Image (cartoon, rainbow, N blue to C red):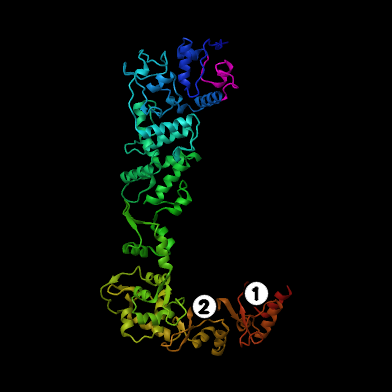
Amino acid sequence: MPIIKKQRHYVLPVRPQIYRDEGPQGYLLRLAEANLLSAVELKSVGISFDYALFVGKGILVDMAIDPELHQFVRYISELWSSETRVWNTQFSRFCPHCILDKGYWRVEWELNFYDVCHHHGVWLIDQCTSCGNKLKWNRAQLTRCSCGSILSAEQSKPCPTNMTDIAHAMSVKILRMDTQYLPDVLKKTDIEQSQRLIRYLGNYMSQASGKNPLKMRHAGDLNQSWPVTSLAAAVICNWPNAFHDALSKLEKNNRTDGRPSLNEVFGQAYHYVFKALKEKPFEELRRQFELWLSDAWKGGLAKRNKRLSGILLEHAAWIPANIACDFLGISHQRLDLLIREGAIEGETHVSEKGRRFAMVRRDNLQQVKDHLFGLIDMTTAGKLLGLQKRRMRQLLTLVFTDAKKLGTSSGSPWAVSRLEVNKLLELSENLDYVSIPDEGCISLEHVLRYWSWTNEDIAGLIISVKSKEITPVNLLETVSGIASWNFKETGLKNWKLKNLNGLGTWLTITQAAKLLGIKEQVAYELVSLGYLQTEVMPKQVKRGTRVRRLTITNFKEKYIFATQIAETFGCSPRKAISQLAKLKIYPISGPTIDGARQVLYTRTEELMRIFDEVENVDDLKLELHS
């Protein structure tokens, strides 16, 4: 069997007390020096910086005498064993003024990225000027270099103020003092998280950062760490403005042609914030990153990006054109026109594959939306549509059913919805412009000026274009609005003929009765009872009351006559009414209800089910018995 050598533990004759701000490596070296041992020999006899060991060997005073010292040593002991990357075990740094005053090694000096003394405002020293070597932890004496040079005699150099501020913040973290007066980005982080933040800001905010800037081979070397801490200090001490400025510079220098993405512009600097710094104490960093994105980022923000919060996507200052179109309820062509007119601030980009896309600012979209969806006066609407004031007044209530007066007096101006005006303007957005109409074509502007069409005919034509019953072929570039619509002349005449024969948009009561298959008097009854909606034409229009063809379609979808039910069942209307009453299905209009001649039912789900399943009156009786 192999011989297992048991480690021998010695009781040290000299046991100097630990100071409340002394570092673990500095104390072990001071403890070894006091007992005439080297650091290696001290470790070989089983002495390490361990709270339980110090208590067991009597190195610490009784807890009742100094409980705060016990708390400090316990915390540093746990941190020493659990967070090894916090400590600078590579080289030994010091402040010559503190060494002269105190004679021991401060705990802050042993931390990575603690590069200056915040007490004296000078850079720390990690290299002996006598021998030129880096100061290491395996030397024989705490306050002397391995060459024998006295460390307190080294000459110090003053450091920038923001470096002392960040050093003070790290001192507050390691000594667990009040963080109330620290920068917001450091208030909730512990010492390890603070170092990660410094490493991130000092590396990724640099224009010269490499592919993997966080990988520092010699972070303990002051020559390697001070550029990182200096940049991080400049950002942290002017938080968050300096952070936003640094992001803007990165965005400007790394922007690529075409549609920029966060990954292309920021690379790991973006991923690291939302992946490696995802703990709650870093929420201030993520929040400021998102605020910068919402205010300055002009690239796309996709909802599939799970790292970005929903609030950012809802409040980003620059948003894609398709989101702006959805918000405004307009087409891409209309949005391009608003951008060209200067109503919306936007930028157009071209990708590497030649695809064009636009980004617009969100901040004035609500104002534009209010303008687009609000009410505008009749004169403004007429100018947008290319109609003269007199003609606009005549067509107003025919084309815009929601037009209303902005007052109670007879002289109050009329107003219409800007949205409805926009819908008319958008009908021809995809059409080409021509300088003169093609052969056999004629513009609406020409019809308005020279043809003897009534206002009812013009309004019917506009509504027919909306319903795509007739479509313009192109636009006349010398005319604005809908007056620029160019139609085939034969198409216009055929449309007019259909309109006169009751096949157009507007119908007389007589024509409506024929479509419904009822007598004219019954149609007038339906109008008076409110089941058939009509519109009264202005005085200048002949045959004043009209019914829209769409109204007839809506009526057929909502109501059904008893005569139609009886015809389906193959019985008399009276018998059908009687059988339906037994099923508790009753009419809404008729001789015994409101004096109407025809019995009328609402197309309820129950009635339609019976209407679809029952073929004759005998089946209706079976339905009743079942």
Left or right for 566, reference 456? right
Name the foreground residue: 450 vs 418.
418
Q: Main secondary structure of the magenta part?
A: loop
Classify mark 2: helix, strand or loop.
helix
Label annotation for residue 486:
none
Question: Type of residue at label 2?
Answer: Thr
Question: Type of residue at label 1?
Answer: Ile
On screen, residue 337 above or below 356: below
The residue tagged 1 is 610
Q: Residues within 10 Å of mark 2 (few under 14, many from 20)?
A: few
At 40% from the left edge and 81% from the top edge, which residue is drawn?
395
On screen, residue 482 above or below 25: below
Q: Residues within 10 Å of mark 1 (few under 14, many from 20)?
A: some
Classify mark 1: helix, strand or loop.
helix
Residue 174 image offset from top left, x and y in percent: 48, 29
Tell me if residue 443 can be seen. no
Residue placed farthest to the right in the image?
A: 625
Compute the Cα span from label 2 to label 1.
Answer: 22 Å
> Per the image, is 350 magenta?
no
Residue 200 image offset from top left, x and y in percent: 40, 36
Magenta stretch in the rendered image: 46-67
**Sooner in the amino-acid sequence: mark 2 or mark 1:** 2
Label annotation for residue 553:
2
Quarter-of-image position of residue 411: bottom left
Assign the N terminus to one quadrant of the image. Answer: top right
Name the foreground residue: 390 vs 456.
390
